Amino acid sequence: MCWSDQTVHFTFPKGSSNGLSHKDLGEVTLEDANGGKYQGLRTHYKWTPGLVVRDWRYVVRIASIDPKNIGSNSLRHALIEGLNMIPNTNMGRTAIYCNQTVKTLLDIEASDKSNVMLKTENWEGKPVTTFWGCPVRRVDSILNTEAAISA
């Protein structure tokens, strides 16, 4: 996905504080696992973002990845094909989103110092796996159990 004002971006309701609101519910008595009581503060948060897809070509989905049969070459080839489907990765900040299984495979590949496509870089003091300079992000809502897409 390539993020920018001209491709894909988030938006928030006009006049809101980035779509985030909160309501202070005050001090309440809470109970721990052992039955002990203590005072706590409760707050209700609500976030109402919107997603704007100005140009659908800047969002690419690589589907039907079988984690049992995935070889490092086939995954890298799929990532190359996906990135090359984006018309211009210089239009914004490009990132790769995947589940824990795929992220783990990419992290293992990045630990191989001879691999020039996948690297572990240090961003703001934290290790980040990148593929051709694009950060790889883990999203737990992407599942391995989704139905395969047939042609």
Image: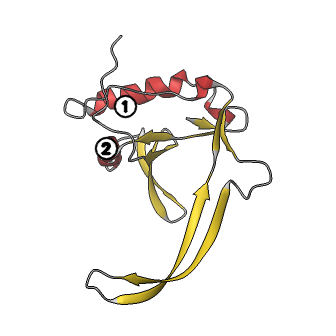
Q: Secondary structure at mark 2?
A: helix
The amino acid type found where label 2 is placed reads: Glu
Q: Quadrant of the N terminus?
A: top right
Image quadrant where residue 94 sits: top right
Placement of 126 over or under 91, stated as above or below? below
Q: Please name the residue that numbered disc 1 is placed on.
A: 76
Q: In the image, what residue occupies the spot 37% across and 89% down?
A: 37
| Number of residues whose C-alpha sits closer than 10 Å to that of mark 1, classed few (under 14), some (14–19) or many (20 or more) | some
Q: Are marks 1 and 2 in contact (CB under 8 Å)?
A: yes
Q: How many marks?
A: 2
Q: Quadrant of the C terminus?
A: top left
The image position of residue 64, as x and y in percent, is 32, 25
Q: Please name the residue that numbered disc 2 is placed on.
A: 109
The image position of residue 38, as x and y in percent, is 41, 89
Q: Secondary structure at mark 1?
A: helix
Is 20 in front, or is 112?
A: 20
The image position of residue 129, as x and y in percent, is 43, 49
Which residue appears farthest toward the top when viewing the image? 151
The image position of residue 114, as x and y in percent, is 34, 43
The amino acid type found where label 1 is placed reads: Arg
Q: In the image, what residue occupies the spot 60% across and 58% down?
A: 46
Image quadrant where residue 77 sits: top left
On the rendered structure, is 79 left or right of 64?
A: right
Q: Earlier in the sequence, mark 1 or mark 2?
A: 1
Placement of 27 over or under 139, stated as above or below? below
Q: In the image, what residue occupies the spot 61% across and 54% down?
A: 47
Q: How is the image coloured?
A: secondary structure
On the rendered structure, is 47 left or right of 147?
A: right
| Number of residues whose C-alpha sits closer than 10 Å to that of mark 2, classed few (under 14), some (14–19) or many (20 or more) | some
Is 18 in front, or is 134?
A: 18
Q: CA distance from mark 1 to mark 2?
A: 10 Å
